[in-house]
């Protein structure tokens, strides 16, 4: 005879089935909703202390997921609570994971024997590379060469020091070994300027001009012989080599030599600014004062070469074609060949000194603009305006303050008795103007912002 099952413990009894059917059809009670909310909070908290649990901590599983006012598992539900009795004990909380101790922390651990101990491996340090030659090419001149670079190794006393301690700065703030006197040598700048096309073209034209004048005299020769009564230098140019050289100087000193000097001085700094290479020269670093001085020295050498080249070629061509005769002046006086040659050299020297005002003005304009044509053209324009104003006799004594007033004072050397007054005034006036313009150029360049 089968024993009748207890409907409270038998899940297949009729009462249990009816109970399940009632739960499936009836809405959830308020207590069931509270249990579900507690489980959801437990899953979200992950075992962290929940303030709704009355100070309890630990994993929120099983009975710990109940709210404070929920009945404890296994306790009889209170009257009127409507809670179902508990159906078995609550599952136990999972044990925490324990991290295993390392082998060396065990009291029975012993180090390996000597045969098993590995020796430290030394990593070889690569040796310093030998200095290798590097080829460079100057884009301005097209010259190329090979340079070797090497890095000096620090001494054993300073090998462990930082780089700032190994390479201390000098009292002026520069790094050890830097000397401003060695930056941008004159020979380097001179080679760069000679390699430029405008320098070659300018010197080549000065070289060819006497030959063009010689060809013009031969083509237009009417067969007449020059006499001492000829009033101008052009009529006496074919009387000898000295006269031909004097005519070449007289015909080119007013404009051609002015353009050449303005070109060499006005293009020296402005061209670097227009090429955007001026900032790299200053970052080399080359001090601004030294950069301006070196470029001015090179421009002076090129200008002096142009001023000397023209009369030298003219004298050589005149001596070859017309012979070595005496120097005949427009006034009718005759100077012997040695004295005439000396006076010709003094005339060339005076022209070089008198054009110094134009060199200073061109240098000032060169540092004031980034356009070489503006600097060269501005200097030539000032010279032309000064010559025009010098022709106005109404200005009287004010004309003596013009920089071109004494431009042709060298013609006094063609007389038997030389008057040095005009040349002395012209040399002093030119040097004063040159000093003023050079100071202005230095002052402007020291305060200029290199933005090109």
Image (cartoon, rainbow, N blue to C red):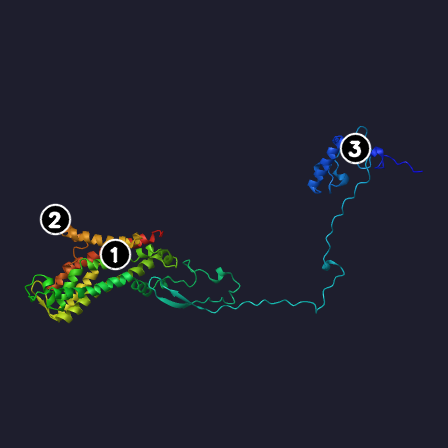
Numbered tag placed on residue 267 in the rendering: none
Query: Residue 168: image x %, image y %?
Result: 46, 61
Q: Is residue 51 visible?
A: yes
User: Most extreme residue toward the right, as rendered?
Assistant: 1
What is the secondary structure assignment of the residue under circle 3? helix
Circle 2 or circle 3, nearest the eye: 3
Q: If you read the primary sequence from the N terminus, does the residue marked by circle 2 or circle 3 appear first?
A: 3
**Closer to the N terminus: mark 2 or mark 1?**
1
Name the mark on residue 360.
1
Q: Earlier along the polypeptide chain: callout 1 or callout 3?
A: 3
Residue hosting label 3: 21
Badge 2 crowding class, 10 Å Cα cut-off, few under 14, some 14 to 19, many 20 or more, is few
Q: Report the side of 63 relative to 294 (left or right).
A: right
* Total numbered badges shown on the rendered structure: 3
Q: Which residue is mark 2?
A: 394
Residue sitting at x 37%, y 55%: 279
- 206 or 337: nearer the viewer: 206
Q: Position of residue 13 (x, y in %)?
A: 85, 35
Q: Does residue 345 lie above or below 438 as drawn?
A: below
């Amino acid at each position: 005879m089968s024993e009748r099952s207890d409907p409270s413990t038998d899940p297949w009894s009729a009462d249990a089935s009816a109970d399940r059917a009632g739960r499936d059809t009836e809405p959830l009670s308020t207590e069931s909703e509270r249990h579900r909310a507690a489980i959801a909070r437990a899953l979200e908290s992950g075992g962290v202390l929940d303030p709704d649990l009355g100070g309890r901590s630990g994993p929120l599983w099983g009975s710990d997921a109940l709210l404070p006012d929920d009945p404890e598992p296994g306790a009889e539900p209170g009257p009127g609570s409507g809670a179902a009795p508990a159906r078995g004990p609550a599952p136990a909380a999972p044990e925490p994971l324990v991290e295993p101790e390392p082998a060396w922390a065990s009291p029975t651990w012993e180090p390996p024997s000597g045969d098993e101990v590995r020796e430290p491996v030394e990593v070889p340090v690569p040796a310093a590379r030998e200095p290798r030659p590097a080829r460079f090419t100057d884009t301005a001149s097209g010259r190329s060469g090979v340079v070797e670079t090497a890095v000096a190794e620090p001494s054993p006393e300073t090998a462990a020091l930082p780089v700032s301690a190994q390479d201390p700065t000098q009292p002026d703030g520069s790094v050890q070994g830097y000397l401003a006197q060695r930056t941008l040598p004159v020979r380097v700048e001179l080679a760069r300027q000679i390699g430029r096309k405008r320098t070659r073209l300018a010197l080549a034209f000065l070289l060819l001009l006497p030959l063009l004048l010689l060809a013009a005299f031969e083509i237009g020769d009417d067969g007449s012989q020059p006499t001492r009564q000829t009033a101008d230098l052009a009529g006496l140019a074919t009387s000898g080599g000295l006269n031909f050289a004097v005519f070449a100087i007289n015909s080119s000193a007013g404009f051609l030599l002015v353009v050449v000097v303005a070109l060499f001085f006005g293009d020296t700094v402005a061209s670097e600014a227009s090429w955007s290479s001026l900032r790299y020269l200053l970052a080399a670093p080359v001090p601004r004062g030294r950069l301006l001085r070196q470029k001015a020295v090179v421009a002076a050498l090129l200008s002096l070469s142009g001023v000397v080249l023209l009369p030298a070629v003219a004298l050589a061509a005149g001596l070859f074609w017309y012979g070595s005769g005496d120097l005949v002046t427009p006034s009718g006086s005759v100077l012997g060949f040695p004295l005439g040659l000396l006076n010709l050299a003094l005339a060339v020297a005076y022209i070089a000194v008198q054009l110094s005002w134009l060199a200073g003005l061109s240098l000032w304009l060169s540092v004031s603009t980034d356009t070489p044509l503006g600097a060269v053209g501005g200097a030539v324009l000032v010279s032309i305006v000064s010559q025009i104003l010098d022709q106005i006799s109404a200005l009287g004594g004010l004309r003596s303050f013009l920089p071109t007033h004494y431009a042709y004072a060298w013609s006094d050397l063609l007389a038997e008795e030389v008057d040095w007054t005009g040349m002395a005034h012209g040399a002093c006036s030119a040097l004063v103007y040159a000093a003023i313009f050079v100071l202005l150029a230095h002052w402007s360049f020291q305060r200029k912002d290199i933005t090109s």
